[in-house]
Each structure stands twice: as structure tokens, then as C-alpha cells.
Image: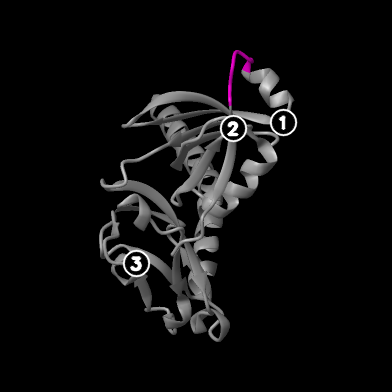
Amino acid sequence: MKKEIQLTAHIREKEKPKQIRKEGFIPAVLYGPKIENKKLKIDQKEFRKVFKEAGESSLVELKIEGEKENFLVLIHDFQRDPISGDFIHIDFYQPDLEKEVEAWVPIVTVGEAPAVKQLGGTLVKNVTEVLVKALPLKLPHEIKVDISSLKTFEDEILTKDLKVEEGVKIMKDPEDVIISVSPPEKVEEELAKLEEEAVEPEVIGEKEKEESSQEKSSSESEKE
């Protein structure tokens, strides 16, 4: 059974969002198919702790100060200040527990890849999270991936290799590569290629200049 994650909210009256943030709170909205929209405010520090634990795929028990009913919600959407990183708005969504919902779930690697440790390769994570579909109470908080199977540079971990509970569907092509290991020489080749591409326009430019100069001289000779 999943650990219960709790968060306290307060009803937002007519305070302006700017004033709410100044007091250390975050303006928020609660909505869902079976409830009326509620304007709330959440303590910034408390929410940070809860978000770190719940992410966007774990249900949170939202307790609204002064109300008897608690709400099982998902952190459906949020906005952050690009400079300070503070949360500036939160959307809480209370889903129908009997209907499947979609949520983004982070991929967490565990173990060590022999192709990295012993062969000097570089671990390549093509995606850091995947979209899953499940009943709200079945949504995973994260998907752990054991990378000890990556013993050579040909080994790959595909979508179909990800392990999730029954009833959880990953909304991604089963054959898509999730994690692999690049050999050292390939990384060096890519860097060399980038350097060549950076120099190439100058070389081409000089060549075109020389050809243009030769054509001009030829044209002048013909006129004479």
C-alpha cells in the first residue's frame, strides 16, 4: 500500500496573487469532474516538500482548512518563477478514481552499467520520463530501471523492458530505445564532426572567393 501524502490548503478569498506570494503562499485551484472549482492558497515550503515526494503521478490527500471533506488529488499543472524557481501557481485535479488518467512518470536508473564502468562508455538516457495511463490509485511514483544489463555497446533498454504493475500502460512505442551506452570513440567522432562543421563554412567561403576571383580574371581577359 502506498504511503499517504498529505497537504494542507486554505481557501483563497479576495487576496491578489502578488500579495499571496509575498506572504509565502502559492495561489492554487482545485477542480475535477465531480466537484466545484475552489480557489486555494498553499504554503510554499510545505508544497515544495510534498512535490518532491509526490511528483505529478502520486495522489495527494488535500485537506482544506475549515472543511470536513478531504480530496485525493493529482498535482496536474504548475508554474514556476524562471529566476527564483519558486512555485507561482498550482492546479490540483481530483480525478474519478474509477476512470483511467494519464500522467508523466520519471525514470530512475539503479545499479551500474558494465559498458560504462569497464568499457569507458557514456550512459545515454533518451528520455527521463514517460507518459503512463492507469487508474489514479495505480499510478506509479517512478519507474526504476536496472542498467546492469548494459554489458556491451550493442545492449539497449527498450520501452517494452520497463517493469510496471498490472493495469499500468506506458504510452510509448514498445521498441523505442530508453537507455543505451555510447562507446568512447563515438563521442570523440561526434565532437570532431562538430568541429569540422564549425570550420567548414570558412573554408567554403575562401574557396568561393578564389573561384569568383578566377572567373573575374578570365572574364576580363576575354574582354581584352
Residue that badge 2 annotates: 65
In this view, 129 is above or below 40 = below
Q: Give the range drawn in magenta.
A: 11-16
Using the image as rendered, state which of residue 136 and residue 210 is in the foreground.
136
Residue 137 lies, in percent from the top left, at: 37, 54
Q: Which residue is drawn at 37% across and 79% down?
A: 154
Please name the amino acid that badge 3 sits on: Val
Residue that badge 1 annotates: 24
Residue that badge 3 annotates: 164
Q: Could you tell me what secondary structure mostly forms the magenta stretch? A: loop
User: Between disc 1 and disc 3, whose residue precedes?
Assistant: 1
Using the image as rendered, state which of residue 108 and residue 45 is in the foreground.
45
Residue 120 lies, in percent from the top left, at: 56, 80
- Neighbourhood count class around disc 3 (C-alpha, 10 Å): few under 14, some 14–19, many 20 upward: some
Please name the amino acid that badge 1 sits on: Gly
Residue 224 visible in the displayed image: no
Q: Is mark 1 on a helix, strand or loop?
A: loop
